[in-house]
Each structure stands twice: as C-alpha cells, then as structure tokens.
Amino acid sequence: MAKTKKSAPYLLPIILSVLLFVLIFITYQIFLADKYYPLTLVGNINISFLTEGQAINKIRSTFQNRAQQKLIFEFAQGSATVDLATSSAILDYSTLEENFKQTHANLFAPFANARIFPQITLNIDKQLNNIASSVDKDPQDAKLFFDETPTPEASPSARIQIKEAENGISLNKEKITQEVKSFLLTGKYQSQLPLKTVPPKVTTTQVLAAKTALETTLQEPIKLIFDNQTWTLDAKQLLTLLDLTKGGGLLLDKDQTNSFLKDIAAKIDQNVQEGLFEFNPGTRRVTAFKPSQEGRKLNIDSTFNLISEALTTNTQKNINLPVEIVRPKIATSDVNSLGIKELVGRGTSSFTGSIPNRMYNIRLAASRLNGVLISPGETFSFNQTVGDISAATGYKQAYVIKEGRTVLDDGGGVCQVSTTIFRAVLNAGLPVLARTAHAYRVDYYERGFPPGLDATVFYPSVDFKFKNDTQNYILIQAYTSGDEAFVDLYGTADGRTTQLTKPVITNQIPPPAELRQDDPALPKGTVKQVDWAAWGANVSFKRTVTRNGETIINETWRSNYKPWQAVFLVGTQ
C-alpha cells in the first residue's frame, strides 16, 4: 500500500504529457483539415499547408510560365529547339484532388513525404518530326557483290566483295517527350538531345558468313542433276538467291529460289496420263486405246533444303534432284483384274436435225468420257471429267438458251451427252448425287422418250454426279452412231434390278406465241427455226432398285419445265 502512494507522483506527468500530445495532434489535424500536409510537392513545386485552391493557383502559375519557354537540346552537329508555347501543354489537376483525399484519409499521412506527378498532355509531334529530319540517319546494310572486273593477279575469292554495315541514328522521341514533361513539372531537363542507335537489317557478320559460304562454290559450284541434265549454281548465280535479312546464318530467299527451281521443274515435270480403255464384248476383255503413263514431279521444297545444306555445310555439292514418280490410278497391265466383265447399264438419245456444230460438240464431249474408269466408291463428276467447255478446249458455237434468248455460244449440245449418261446411270441402278433438269422441254430429249429423262450441265456450276457403289470398277464407253448418242457402263453385275415408272405429267401450260429474231449471219429472206414450241409441265417418275429381294433405292424424280416458244431466226444479211 505504501508502494502505490509512492509511485503516484510519477504517473501524473506522464498522463499530462499524453493528453498534451493528443491535444496538439488533434489541433494539427484540425488546422490541416483543408490543407495539403507538409512535404507535399508537385514536381518541385511545394504546396505544403496550402488549400486545394491555393495549390492549384500556385501550380498553374508555375506551369504556365514554364509552358512559354523554349528548350534547347544539344547534339554533335548543332542544337535543336522545342518551343513549349506551341505545344498545347495541359496538366491534369485531378491527380491533386485524388492525392488530397487519400492522404487525409490516412491517420499517419501528415508525417509522410508526398511527391505528386500529374499527367501532362502536349502536342510536339510536328516539332519532333522536324528535329528528326535533321538528325536521323538511315542504317546502311552490309552488302555482298560480285566483282565483274577482277585483276589478273587477284585470287578467286577476291571477286566476292563486301561493303560493311553502318549503324543508323534516330531521335528518341519517347525520351525527349519525357524530358519536356520533366521540365514542365520540375523546371529541369537533360539538354543532351536523346538519340538511339538503329542497327542495320544485314550486319557485316552476316555478310562475312555468306561470303565464306559462297567462296566454297568458286572452286566447286553446286550442281543439280537429273538423268542426263545438269544445272549449275555458281557463286554469281547464288548471290542472286540470297536473303541476308533474316539473320541466323546464311539463308536462301525462299521465293527467289523457288522461282529459279520452277524453271527447272518445267523441264522435268510430266503430268500423269490416265489410260483410256474399251471393252470388247466378244472377248470380254478390256484393251487400252490410250495407255496409262507415269508422271514425275520435282519436289521443290526438298530441293531448296538440299541447296541450303550444301551452302552451309561441307556436304556434297552435287545434288541428285528429288523427283517423285506419280503413278496413274490404273496401270494398263492391271486393267483386266478390275472386274469389268459385262454391260451393266446403257443410255441412248437422238440428235437428228442438229446443226453440224452441235453434232461436233456432242461427239467431242462423248470422246472425253469414253474410256474413263470409275473406282469402287468413287463419285463421278461430269464437269471434272469433261472439263471446261469453251472454244479454248475445242468446242464450236451452237445454239443455246442464254439469258432468255437463243444465241450462238461455245459447247451447244453437250447436254445431249449428260442426258445420255443420266439415262445409263438410271438403268444401271446406280445412285445419282446431282442432276438438274432443263428449264424447258427440249425436243431432242423427247424423241422416243417421255419427258423428265434429261440432265443439263453448265461448267463449272451445274454438274451431273453419280456414285459407283459397286465392289468393282465401272468403265464408261461413250460414242455416237449416226445421229444417236450412246453411253454404255461396263462392270460386274451384282444382282440389282431397276424399275422406272411411266412419267406423270401435270400442270401443263401451252407455249407462248412464236418469236422471230433478226440474224445478220443469215442471207436476207432466209428463215431458220432454232427452237420448237414446248408445253410447260410438271413431270415426275419413280425409280426402284432392288438387289437380292432388298430395296436399295426408292426415289421420285421431279422436273418442272416452263413453257417455251418456237424461235425463228430471220436473215438480214
């Protein structure tokens, strides 16, 4: 008890000191409630103990004064000036407000040093571009060239010369912009004009490596060999194929080298020739009237890699070109092992009355189908097989319907062949994948046949396609005899039978009145009919294909024909 009374006199001063400190701290906080805390600077501008309004006025005054200055930057060839009066410099004062709120929310902020760097926007791009135009210097790539006029005493390697690279110089616009902003905030900047080195794309080291590689070809050039042909790549030729911009050692320019190799490939490559065959019903054997022939093709990518390797390593400089053999789908010697034994489907049509050019086109298109083999599971395309139908591929002009008129155009009559093969495929019981009916009923396709058994083609958009879903190859024999077209399909009968119903004709519409068109190609007074009136109609028929008692195809074919008028050409010559 005596001990407690003795310590009381010492406790009172401590309590009074703490109360005094708290009182001073509270007074300090109240005094600074609307002022920036001590040691607060914006750049080098001291805004301690200033209210927000006072601080902004002080900063604005200093900033505007500095924004009227001209900054001089020194460099080796002289000096450059940045006129801040034309820079439209703007300081973002919102940073001050954010700092004020953050520091006054922190109990211990009054005792911390705060340095604020507000965002500054300015427009000095034009001035910097003007400065850059006077100081920038483009780098100079190292170069490799072949001396066309060497002195007699010069060594062979002296013919390959180099020009060393030089670094370029450019204005460091980011750095000078930072210095300008630093001056606006602190009144200080580095007066040395900031420049940066621009390295060349092609260095001296790269060119020296290329020179060393090319020197190996002076005594032993690279030779590309195929059969009895040789193409030589000497140092001078290789120099035109180099690409020294990629680094990483010597590289050939891919595009340049491939262009060079394509010229060689044109002398080597041969297209594969697929055989064309015909079936002899008497011997039940297939013979070739156009034997198959292997093709060959230069592998350009592999050749490029071999040349690159020969340049950069000590490998053999004589390169046997990688030429790939392209084999035909069917070798002539194998054709009688493909299961082509008998007729499995036939289609016919008549083109009596056709003009000579139309007859010619029919025979030409048939010849391009004749002898074609279709492998098991393969889809046959008329357009892909026959190819482009134009004057460039041998077709003549005959009358066709184009844009609602009867006109002369390349390949008129080819649809006679597509119609005929459509009928053969229907009879063979094979699945049809693409078929388009004509826009109107054509007289040629209804001679001895009901409507609805036609198929039009228009290269390359409108096609006729079917699939060989048998287990053996199918051989197409397409030919004409007199004024009739035939397509025979040979293969191996697998027991399928086909039944076609009689077409049903509905919604018949009579043809419009006849149309007479002037034709300056015909003598005056001559009248020639080129189209015949046709009734419009909707036509449908069914096809059922069965095999071993199972129905494998059950389909309905529909054709919608619009009415068509008779067309007469009247000579005006």
Image: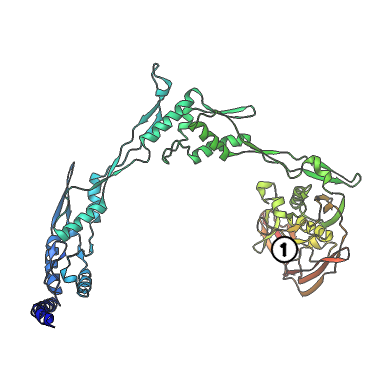
Q: Which of 384 and 8 is in front in this view?
A: 8
Give residue 442's position: percent from left, percent from top: 76, 63
Give residue 340's position: percent from left, percent from top: 84, 49
Q: Which of 30 and 26 is in front in this view?
A: 26
- The quarter of the image holding the N terminus is bottom left
- For disc 1, the marked residue is 436
Give residue 123's position: percent from left, percent from top: 23, 59
Q: Is residue 343 above or below residue 260?
A: below
Task: Report helix, strand or loop for mark 1.
Answer: loop
Q: Which of 158 and 93 is in front in this view?
A: 93
The image's colouring method is: rainbow
Q: In this view, does 341 lie to the left or right of 34?
A: right
Q: In this view, does 200 lie to the left or right of 239?
A: left
Residue at position x 51%, y 35% in the image: 308
What's the amino acid at mark 1?
A: Thr
Q: Quadrant of residue 69?
A: bottom left
Res. 413 in view: no
Give residue 169's position: percent from left, percent from top: 27, 43
In the image, farthest residue toward the front: 2
Res. 531 in view: yes
